[in-house]
Every structure is written in structure tokens, then in C-alpha cells.
Amino acid sequence: MEEKKKQIAILGSTGSIGTQALEVIADSHLQFEVYALTANNNVDLLISQARQFCPEHVVIGNESLYPQLKSALADLPIKVYAGTDAIAQVAEMQPIDIVLTAMVGYSGLKPTISAIKAGKKIALANKETLVVAGELICQLAIDNRVSILPVDSEHSAIFQCLAGEGDNAIEKLILTASGGPFRTKSMDELQQVTCKQALKHPNWDMGAKITIDSASLMNKGFEIIEAKWLFGVTPEQIEVVVHPQSIIHSMVQFTDGSIKAQLGMPDMKLPIQYALTYPERVKSNFPRFDFNQCTQFTFEQPDLTRFRNLAFAFHAMERGGNMPCILNAANEIVVAAFLKEKIGFLQMSDIIESVMHKASFVNKPSYEDYVQTDASARELASSLIK
Ligand code: MG
């Protein structure tokens, strides 16, 4: 008997992770069917994806683009919706088995909550969801018996290292960081770096927001918080090491002192596929790492004086409550301003630090507290951008 194909919804299908996920599904003989696709603004790409994969439902977040989407798909039996509420509603639909959350930033929170409440397995690429509201999301996942499978390469590496370890205790998680394009720049040089330079990542090809976060090490900061929630460790058990070659994707040290690492080319398709096919591994044609081509692996300590965002993230993780939500909201505002060349690279950290000092702290936030915190931290950050 033929096995029923797994139904997948991709939230944020036109972004870097979304498009690569569709390539993984199209290129391989995976037993997946695309049930729903959602995007925020890129209506042209959404139209061509919908024509290629023929999902049951597509949603465009930006409501003004609805007429264009609707008429472009009028000849196909695809249901078309618009607006952020529709994205959350589509994520709950009964036939869906897996929801891949690949949207950018805070916007991922609401639809992820909807999908978890509807009992969907989550392939989590939107790390901000766990940064903002990790405690709430993890509790919801437990209550609804939902598994959250990491797509982020570091967390996928840790997840792969933990496979087969059962209840063996973790001593620490060692997240690797490439160090980004500015790893060797002095403070004076960092003062002058441009948005264009920041958008050139040495190893990874990603969307604009995460590329800036990688250059400022905020991405690594978010990833330590993401790791705390995904793997249930304490802040003291998380370490970051800079590994500029980006071949070791992260490591786990166990209580006997043994360290396991996961290696591979810097290519997101592997972690995407692993999240979709877990616990199975499926044959792929992804590029292979060749030890003949790599002369050395190097490691160094992250510099928290030059890259203050990582220090802020450690502080936010230790403080808990709504502090990571404040950190994320401030960061979204400063990154948008940096991309528009309204502020300089180092100013991003200055503004984030002030917002973390000024925003009101909530120790045990509810969902409504997160919504409120996000809005007020954004307002604060915006007021500090001249
Ligand atoms: Mg990552």
C-alpha cells in the first residue's frame, strides 16, 4: 500500500529557508506534499511557487497584494487569502502534518502558537519565536504533545549529536559561530563599516535581516537563547566558540567529558531535510565536505567587547522574563534602520543597550505581556533613532 504523503505548510515560503525547503521537496523523492504556502510581500515569487507546487491554500500577509495574487491563480483550484490572521489560521488546518516556520522575526510568534495548539509538528526556522517567548512556546508544546524540530544549523547539529543518547546528561552545548564578515575588524573600523559590507557573509547565503544579525553576532546571541529552550539547559551550560570555517556546526559535551560534533558544508538544505525526515536520514545530492580541500579548522573566543550584542543576549538569557523579547524588538528596529543607512553599525548595540535599560521588566510574562513588551520596546528603540 502506498504511504500517505505528509502534508507540509511553509510559512515564509519566499525567504531563504522557504525557497530552499521547496527545492529540497522538489529535488528529492521525499514523501511530502505542499499543502499551504504563505509570504509577506514577495507576491511574484509566491505566485510562481503556487503554480509549481499547487498547494491547497496560499496566503499573502500584505493585504494590498491580494487582488494580484487572486487573479494570477484564478485558473487553479487554489484558495487564496490575505492578512496576518489568515497566516495563523492556515497553520491550524486539519490535513497539515508539519509546519515549517520560516518567516522573519517576531511575526513568527502568533502563527507558531496557532500551529502548536492545533497539534502540528513544528520545523522551527524562525528562531525569534523562541527568543521572544521560549517559556510559553515550550509549555504549549508539552501541553499539546507537539515536537519542535530545529532547522537552524547549530541546533540541528546539537539535535543530531543527541540522537541515540537517551537520558545521557549534557554537560554543555558548544555553539560554533563563523564570526561574520567583521571578525577581525578593530573598533575604529567597525565604526565605519557599511551596510553593503555587512550583507556579505563569508560562508552563508541568507536573508538580509539574519545576515546583519550574523555580522553583529546578535544571531549567535539569539541562538544561545534558542538552544536554552530547545534543549532544556541552563545559561551556564552554553558556550560559544568562533570557528571561521563553518564546517563544525556545533557540539555537545557529555558528563563523561566526551564531545560530539556534527560536520558538513555550510548549506541549509541538510538541516531543513533532516527536520522534515527525522528520525530518518534520506539520501541527498547536497555538496559534500572534502578533507583534501580544507587545510585547517581553527577556533577562537568571541570578543564581547567588540561584539556587545552577544553579551546582551547572555544577559537577557540569564535575566529571563520579557528581557529576551525586549532584546529582539530593539534589534528588529535597529537592523531595519541600519539597512536603511539611518544609523551606523556600532550604534545598533548602543540603542539596544538603552532599550534594555529603559523598558519595563516583567518576570513571568503572559502572551499579552509579550505583545505589549514588543510594541513598547519598538517604540523606545525608534525614539532613539534620530
Ligand atoms: Mg544558525
Image (cartoon, rainbow, N blue to C red):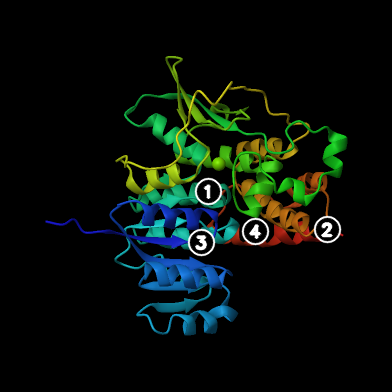
Q: Which residue is mark 4?
A: 374
Side of 141 relative to 129 (left or right)? left
Of callouts 2 and 4, the N-terminal one? 2
Split into 4 quadrants, where in the image is the C terminus? bottom right
What kind of element bears circle 4? Answer: helix
Of callouts 4 and 3, the N-terminal one? 3
Q: Which residue is mark 2?
A: 342
Q: Which numbered mark, 2 or 4, is in the foreground of this view?
A: 2
Q: Is residue 362 visible?
A: no
Q: Is residue 304 above or below residue 42?
A: above
Of callouts 1 and 2, the N-terminal one? 1
* Place of residue 291 in the rendered image (x, y in percent of width and height, measured from the top left): 49, 24
Of callouts 3 and 1, the N-terminal one? 3
* Place of residue 196 in the rendered image (x, y in percent of width and height, measured from the top left): 76, 51
- Write down the quadrant of residue 25 in the picture: bottom left
What kind of element bears circle 2? Answer: loop
What kind of element bears circle 1? Answer: helix
Tell me whether circle 4 and circle 3 mark residues in contact (CB < 8 Å).
Answer: no
Q: Residue 12 shows which numbered tag?
A: 3
- Camera-side residue of 340 and 26: 26
